[in-house]
C-alpha cells in the first residue's frame, strides 16, 4: 500500500502562489464501499483566469466530487464518470444562470485514483497526465477525444487511462505542460526528493502554469497535502517601524540555507526531507482561517491625539553592505495543518460571524412571514417577571430564560424548515431529474442516453432523501429500466429469508442450498447456521449443531467451506464442512454432528481454503502447497489417499480464491477475475491440461475482452437441463450467467420486492441451488430469488 504526497504548482503573471483553488486530494473515509477501501483520489479542475466561480465554490464542488466517487458503487471507472458528470452539472448550471454575456466557463478536469498499485485516470477536456516511473516517462493525453471540457454540454465524453505504479513514482496533472518538460528532463526523477523534483520543474517555468505533482511512497493509504514554502517579496523599509530606543544592528547576518543537490542516486523519502519540511500529520478536513483585512480602515476616534512633535531628521544614508541580506528558510514544503484551508486564503469581513447570524435570522423572519397562515401561533399568557426584593430579576427567572430561548429558536427554525424547506428541496431535485430524463429520451447515441438516465436517477435519489412519492417511484423505475436495457441487465426481485433473525455479529461468507434447507457459514465463529423451509417461509433453526469443538475424539477447527449433501445418505447429514487441516464434519438436523479425518498427502496439508464434490471425488484447494488435491470415495466418505489433480504442468495457485467442478472440467477463479480451466484425465497417455486464462465469449462464441470493471468473488455450477456457470460480481451486485464454454448469456442484478436496491453492504456469499434458486448474503442478511 502507498501513501500519497501531493503539492501544487500555480504560477500566474510570473508569480508563484502557494495554494491552488482547483486541487483536492483525499483518501477513502472509514466507512466506505468495500471496492473503494484504500483508494486515494486526486482532482485538478482548471478554469479560465476570469471566471465567476470563487475559490470557495471550486473547493465545494471538488469536495462533492470526492464524496460522489467514494459513495458510487461499481467499478473505479464508473465512480470516476459519476464524479465528473456531477462537476459538469454544477458548471453547466452556473453557466446557464450566472455567466455574463453568454460566455461560458469551460473547465478542464484531471481525475486520478490510486487503487493499490494501479493508477486510473480520467480526462475531461484537453489535458495531460505524466507518469514518471523508474523505467521511463509516459504522457497520457488525447487532446481531441477528451472533448472541449466541462460546462459546455449536459453530456461529456471523458477519456480513461490506466497504468501501474511503483514506489517513488511521480504523477503530474497539468492541462498545458511547458515544452521544457521533456522525457530527458523528467527521466530518473522518481529517484529525487519532492523538493529536488519541484526545483527541476521550475527551472524554466513559463509565465502562467497550473499543475499538481504527486509521489507515491510505501505507507498506509494516507494522503499528505504539502504546501510549497515560497519566498516572500521584501517590503519597503519603514523608518518609523523600529521601536524607540532600540539600537541599530551593526551588520546584517546571513542564515545558512542548506541546498540539496539533484542526486539521482539517492532516494529521499518524504519523511526524511530536509529540515524545511514540517512533520507530516494525518489528513483531515481543514477548518477555515479568517485573516485580518489590513486594507480596512481602523477607527481611531477613541484614541487621544498625541502632542505635536518636531519632525524627525531624515535617516542617514549608509553605504551598501557587502554582506548579502538575510534570507528566510522558505524553500521546500510544509504539511498543511488542520487549521488551514486547502484553497487560497481570503480576507474576511469585519464581523463574519455576526453578519452570517444576521442573514440567517433575517431569512427566518422572511420565511416565517410567508408561511404565517399555515402556522397558528400559540396563545401565550404574559405574566409579570418575578423579581427579588432588590428589584432585580430573580436568578431562577434568568436561568429559565437562558434555557428556554434557545429551545424556542430551534423550534421555530425546525417548524419553518419542515413546512417549506424539505418540500422545496424535493421539488427542486425532482425537476432536475425530469429534465435529464426528457433529455435522455430524445438522444440517439447510447452513451448520451446512459449519461442522461444516470443523472436522472441520481437526482431522483436525492429527491427521495426528503420523502418518497408516487412521482419519484415512477421516475426511478423509468430511469432504472432504461439503464438496464442499455446494459443488457435483467433485474430480479429478491426476498429476505429470515428478516431480523440473524445476530448482527454474524458474517456469512459461504452458502450451501438444497431444495428444503439453506446453510450459511459464519466466518467469525467458523460455524454453520441452518434455515429450514416451513409453511411460513424460512426459519432459523436454533438447535442446529455444526461448528468447531470436540467430535469423535478429534478437535474440529473453524470450518472454511461447506457443501450440501444428497438426501438419505448413510450419515443422515444434510451438509458437510471442512476445517483448514482436513477434518470433515457431517452435520445432522436435531442430532450431534459426526466427524472423520482425511488422510494427509505425502507432503502434508498446507492450508485448505475451499473444496467441492463432483461425483464421487473430493477436490480440495490448498494454495499454500500450490495444489488441488483429489480424494476418491463414494461422494460421502473419502477414505482414499489424496493425489495431485495436475500432472507435470501445475499452474500458479497463489491467487485462486474459489473453485468449481463440472464433470471433468475444473474451474479456478483468480483475484483479477479471470478463469483457469483444467480438464482432468485418468489416462497417463493424455495428461491433465490447463487453459490459462480461459477466454470469455459472447452468445455466438466470439471472443470478448476481460471484464475489467467486474469484481468476481465466487462461482457456482448447475446441472442440466440448462447446465451453466454463474459468477458473482460484487460491484453490482451482478450475477454473470455463462455457458459451460464461458460464453456470456446474460447479466442478472438484484433488487428488493419494493423495487429498491439492496442494503448498502457488500455481497459476502453467493450460491445457486440445484433447483436454480440463487442465494446471496450481505453480512448477516440473506436473500434469495428464482433464476429465469
Image (spheres, helix red, strand yellow):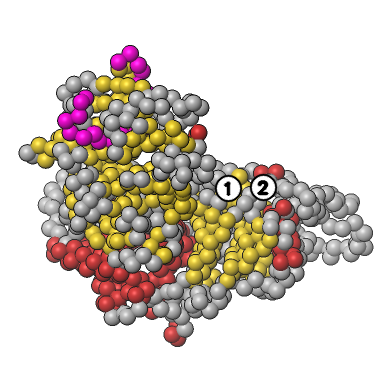
Q: Residue at x 46, y 52 (%)?
A: 691
Instruction: Decide which of tag 1 and tag 2 comes sooner along the chain.
Output: 1
- The residue nearer to you, when weighing 642 against 438, is 642
Density class for disc 2 (Cα within 10 Å; few <14, some 14-19, many ≥20) is many
Q: Is residue 647 left or right of residue 232?
A: left
Density class for disc 1 (Cα within 10 Å; few <14, some 14-19, many ≥20) is many
Label at residue 588: none
Instruction: Say whether residue 505 is visible.
Output: no
The picture places residue 594, in percent across and down from the top left corner, at 26, 21
The picture places residue 228, in percent across and down from the top left corner, at 66, 57
The picture places residue 502, in percent across and down from the top left corner, at 23, 34
Q: Is residue 698 magenta?
A: no
Query: How far apart are the alpha carbons under marks 1 and 2?
Result: 10 Å
Q: Are marks 1 and 2 in contact (CB under 8 Å)?
A: yes
SS class, disc 1:
strand
Q: Is residue 739 left or right of residue 76?
A: left
The picture places residue 400, in percent across and down from the top left corner, at 25, 39
Instruction: Say whether residue 614 is visible.
Output: yes
Q: Residue at x 18, y 36 (%)?
A: 517
Region in magenta: 552-571
Q: Residue at x 67, y 63 (%)?
A: 137
Q: Residue at x 31, y 80 (%)?
A: 443
Q: Which residue is mark 2?
A: 270
Amino acid at each position: 500500500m502507498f501513501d500519497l504526497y501531493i503539492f501544487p504548482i500555480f504560477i500566474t503573471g510570473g508569480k508563484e502562489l502557494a495554494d491552488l483553488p482547483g486541487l483536492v486530494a483525499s483518501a477513502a473515509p472509514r466507512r466506505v464501499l468495500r471496492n473503494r477501501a484504500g483508494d486515494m483520489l486526486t482532482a485538478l479542475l482548471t478554469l479560465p483566469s476570469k471566471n465567476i466561480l470563487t475559490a470557495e465554490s471550486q473547493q465545494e464542488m471538488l469536495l462533492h466530487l470526492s464524496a460522489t466517487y467514494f459513495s458510487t458503487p461499481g467499478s473505479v471507472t464508473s465512480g470516476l464518470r459519476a464524479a465528473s458528470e456531477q462537476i459538469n452539472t454544477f458548471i453547466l448550471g452556473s453557466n446557464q444562470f450566472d455567466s455574463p454575456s453568454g460566455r461560458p466557463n469551460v473547465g478542464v478536469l484531471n481525475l486520478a485514483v490510486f487503487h493499490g498499485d494501479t493508477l486510473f485516470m480520467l480526462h475531461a477536456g484537453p489535458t495531460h497526465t505524466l507518469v514518471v516511473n523508474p523505467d521511463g516517462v509516459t504522457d497520457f493525453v488525447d487532446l481531441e477525444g477528451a472533448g472541449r471540457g466541462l460546462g459546455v454540454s449536459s453530456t461529456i465524453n471523458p477519456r480513461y487511462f490506466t497504468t501501474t505504479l511503483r514506489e517513488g513514482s511521480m504523477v503530474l496533472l497539468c492541462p498545458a505542460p511547458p515544452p521544457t518538460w521533456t522525457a530527458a528532463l523528467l527521466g530518473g526523477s522518481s529517484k529525487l526528493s519532492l523538493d529536488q523534483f519541484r526545483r527541476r520543474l521550475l527551472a524554466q517555468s513559463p509565465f502562467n502554469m497550473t499543475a499538481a505533482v504527486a509521489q507515491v511512497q510505501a505507507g498506509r493509504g494516507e494522503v499528505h497535502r504539502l504546501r510549497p514554502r515560497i519566498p516572500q517579496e521584501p517590503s519597503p523599509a519603514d523608518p518609523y517601524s523600529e521601536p524607540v530606543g532600540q539600537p541599530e544592528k551593526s551588520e546584517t547576518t546571513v542564515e545558512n540555507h542548506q541546498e540539496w543537490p539533484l542526486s539521482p542516486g539517492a532516494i529521499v523519502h518524504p519523511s526524511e526531507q530536509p529540515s524545511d519540511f514540517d512533520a507530516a500529520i494525518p489528513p483531515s478536513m481543514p477548518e477555515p482561517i479568517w485573516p485580518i483585512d489590513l486594507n480596512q480602515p481602523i477607527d481611531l476616534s477613541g484614541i487621544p491625539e498625541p502632542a505635536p512633535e518636531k519632525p524627525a531628521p531624515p535617516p542617514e544614508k549608509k553605504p551598501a553592505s557587502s554582506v548579502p541580506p538575510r534570507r528566510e528558510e522558505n524553500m521546500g514544503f510544509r504539511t498543511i495543518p488542520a487549521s488551514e484551508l486547502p484553497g487560497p486564503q481570503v480576507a474576511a469581513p469585519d464581523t463574519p460571524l455576526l453578519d452570517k447570524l444576521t442573514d440567517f435570522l433575517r431569512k427566518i423572519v422572511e420565511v416565517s412571514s410567508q408561511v404565517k397562515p399555515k402556522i397558528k401561533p400559540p396563545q401565550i399568557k404574559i405574566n409579570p417577571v418575578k423579581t427579588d426584593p432588590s428589584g432585580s430579576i430573580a436568578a431562577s427567572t434568568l436561568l429559565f430564560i437562558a434555557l428556554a430561548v434557545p429551545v424556542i429558536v430551534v423550534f421555530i427554525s425546525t417548524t419553518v424548515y419542515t413546512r417549506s424547506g424539505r418540500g422545496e428541496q424535493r421539488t427542486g431535485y425532482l425537476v432536475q431529474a425530469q429534465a435529464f430524463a426528457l433529455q435522455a429520451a430524445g438522444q440517439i447515441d447510447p452513451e448520451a442516453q446512459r449519461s442522461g438516465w444516470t443523472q436522472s436517477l441520481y437526482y431522483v435519489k436525492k429527491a427521495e432523501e426528503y420523502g418518497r412519492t408516487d412521482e419519484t417511484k415512477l421516475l426511478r423505475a423509468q430511469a432504472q429500466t432504461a439503464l438496464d436495457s442499455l446494459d443488457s441487465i435483467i433485474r430480479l426481485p429478491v426476498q429476505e429469508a429470515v428478516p431480523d433473525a440473524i445476530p448482527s455479529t454474524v458474517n456469512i461468507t459461504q452458502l450451501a442450498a438444497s431444495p428444503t434447507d439453506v446453510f450459511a457459514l459464519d466466518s467469525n465463529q467458523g460455524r454453520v447456521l441452518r434455515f429450514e423451509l416451513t409453511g411460513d417461509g424460512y426459519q432459523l433453526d436454533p438447535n442446529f449443531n455444526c461448528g468447531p469443538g470436540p467430535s469423535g475424539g478429534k478437535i474440529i477447527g473453524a470450518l472454511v467451506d461447506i457443501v450440501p449433501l444428497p438426501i438419505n445418505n448413510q450419515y443422515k447429514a444434510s451438509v458437510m464442512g471442512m476445517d483448514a487441516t482436513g477434518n470433515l464434519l457431517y452435520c445432522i438436523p436435531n442430532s450431534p454432528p459426526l466427524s472423520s479425518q482425511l488422510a494427509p498427502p505425502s507432503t502434508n496439508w498446507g492450508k485448505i481454503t475451499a473444496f467441492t464434490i463432483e461425483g464421487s471425488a473430493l477436490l480440495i484447494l490448498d494454495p499454500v502447497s500450490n495444489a488441488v488435491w483429489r480424494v476418491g470415495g463414494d461422494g460421502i466418505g473419502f477414505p482414499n489417499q489424496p493425489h495431485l489433480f495436475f500432472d507435470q504442468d501445475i499452474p500458479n495457485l497463489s491467487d485462486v480464491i474459489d473453485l468449481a467442478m463440472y464433470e471433468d472440467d475444473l474451474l479456478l477463479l483468480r483475484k483479477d477475475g479471470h478463469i483457469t480451466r483444467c480438464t482432468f484425465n485418468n489416462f497417463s497417455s493424455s495428461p491433465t491440461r490447463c487453459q490459462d486464462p480461459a477466454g470469455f465469449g459472447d452468445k455466438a462464441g466470439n471472443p470478448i475482452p476481460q471484464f475489467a470493471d467486474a469484481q468476481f468473488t465466487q462461482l457456482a455450477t448447475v446441472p442440466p437441463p440448462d447446465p451453466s456457470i454463474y459468477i458473482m460480481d460484487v460491484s453490482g451486485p451482478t450475477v454473470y450467467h455463462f455457458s459451460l464454454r464461458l460464453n456470456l448469456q446474460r447479466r442478472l442484478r438484484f433488487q428488493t420486492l419494493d423495487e429498491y436496491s439492496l442494503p448498502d453492504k457488500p455481497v459476502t456469499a453467493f450460491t445457486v441451488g440445484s433447483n436454480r434458486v440463487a442465494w446471496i448474503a450481505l453480512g448477516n442478511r440473506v436473500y434469495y430469488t428464482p433464476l429465469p
